[in-house]
Image (cartoon, rainbow, N blue to C red):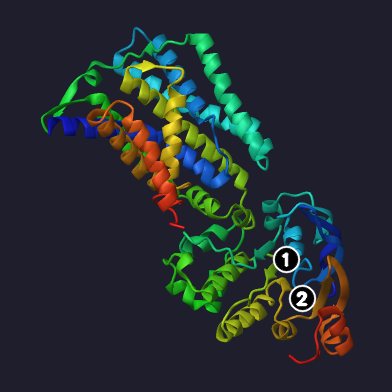
Amino acid sequence: MSAATLLEVRDLHVYLGESHILQGVSFDVRQSGITGLLGRNGVGKTTTLRGILGLVTRTGHVVLGGEETTALPVHEIVRRGVAYVPEDRDVFAGLTVEENLRLAERAGSELRYDLVYELFPELRQRAAQKAGTLSGGQQQMVALARALLNADNRILLVDEPTKGLAPLVVRQVVEALQRAAEVATILLVEQNLSVAHKLVRDVVVLDQGRVSFTGDVDQLMGDPELARRHLGLAAAGSH
Amino acid sequence: MTTIALLLITGLGLGALYFLIAAGLSLIWGLMRVLNFAHGAFFTVAAYAGWSASRLLTSSPAELRWAVAVVVAIVVGGAFAALTEVLLIRPLYSRHVGQVLVTVGLALATISLVQGGFGSDPQPFAVPDWMTNTSSIAGAGIPNTRLLVIVFAAVVLAVLLFFLQRTRFGLIVRAGVENRDMVQALGIDVQRAFTLVFTIGGMAAGLSGILAATYYGTVDPVRGTSMLIFAFIVVIIGGLGSVTGSAVAAVVVGVLQQFLNFYAAAGVGDFSVVLLLAVVLLVRPGGFSGSST
């Protein structure tokens, strides 16, 4: 496994209205594999992903593969190989599944429809169905499929992909993320610690807008005191 | 029966003019959340540009002069709208009050400039003879200009639907109306879509301006403003961001206006349209094409 850094976040600050949401967040994401961005509710995990992508006004530095992307507009950051799977999936409800995927196609990028339909065969059957009429799990498949479609995506920012899903669908999403990690680096926000422990290698823990821990997932989850301190777990290691 | 046919088709013609203004307004609001009070200025400037071009060709056949006027109006409407988006709206995307002030200011300044240059009175607009004739439909002599405007609006509706349903830009616009941030997060330069939508809206408004000149037989510096009010009503009744909704609402508003102004009293039709707007906002706030909640 390469230890090369793909994404560097340095001193990221985000204000939303009067609130200072991110207060100097800094961490690295190693090339390949899944890095977990963990923490209690409301500590700034989603804002961090949106800050990396430029969807919120921020200061600090975001460096992707050695290139500073902080000053770029959102679409230029995405074109440099960043894909986003938002917390609420944000599929285009009025468009069909096929149109949702077509919209994600990028000129010049190899398209991985074979991988997408292998992971989510249901999407092929529902290609002509309006995305707004899909179940939550199916919408999550569309959201993940959009992120996986372009072969030149280097990092996937995935925000709580299992939130509100049935256990069977959670298993399918976990398998899809494991497979996706074979072809791209993933920065994953996940509240389900059992899922997080199964998937991630490195963890970054946020607390009140600051990084409180970075390291190996086993180090965090295997130490009850560490887990209690950073994640508020009563009994760590139970996953 | 004759009167009903006449009122119906005249109402459809009026609705067609409303639709041509409302379609652009609706897309601009749906995609960009810009309340464009300058849309009437696109209508007016384009109408006067077409009228001026027609006057330059006095020795040419009437059909050619009219066709040139239409083309010039569409081009000028689109160019004026694109410049407005790039120079005035773009710096104010996150400042809604600023957008309202700048578009209202542009509308007022444009009317004043047009009045200063061409006078406050309506100017006659020459059209080919066959347009001033009538065609018999259900026993009623329908002015050909009404039929012409309806045909143009139907063609524009078909072209817009084709654009929205069958092209990638249309796909981007439809997606952007739903969730602009997510469109950007897919690597799409939504700014280009903004300019394109503004330009298309301006072209449709320009066409509406010259067709209104054909319909009424004059160009008028304040017609754009008065039609814009009804176009806004059409946009809200039809559902913000929906071209089809605007088309249906434009027909309802135009026909309702004509029938009530004739059978009740002048002005009742206009009032009833405002009443209809209030009812729609209470019963179905999203308009014909939107959510009922």
- State which tag comes first along the sequence, 2 or 1: 2
Residue B137 seen anywhere in this rendered image of the structure: no
Residue B200 seen anywhere in this rendered image of the structure: yes
- Where in the figure is residue A148, as x and y percent of width and height? 61, 69
Which label is found at residue A36? Answer: 2
Q: Nearer the viewer, residue B247 or A139?
A: B247
Rendered position, A40 above or below B56: below
Are dots 2 and 1 in contact, CB under 8 Å? Answer: no
- Where in the figure is residue B173, as x and y percent of width and height? 52, 49
Q: Residue at x 16, y 30 (%)?
A: B3
Location of residue A107 by image quarter: bottom right
- Where in the figure is residue B29, as x and y percent of width and height? 53, 43
Taking the image as shown, residue B100 lies to the left or right of residue A131, namely right
Label 1 chain ID? A
From the image, tell me which residue sits under label 1: A46
Label 2 chain ID? A
Q: Amino acid at mark 2?
A: Gly
Q: Nearer the viewer, residue B200 or A40?
A: A40
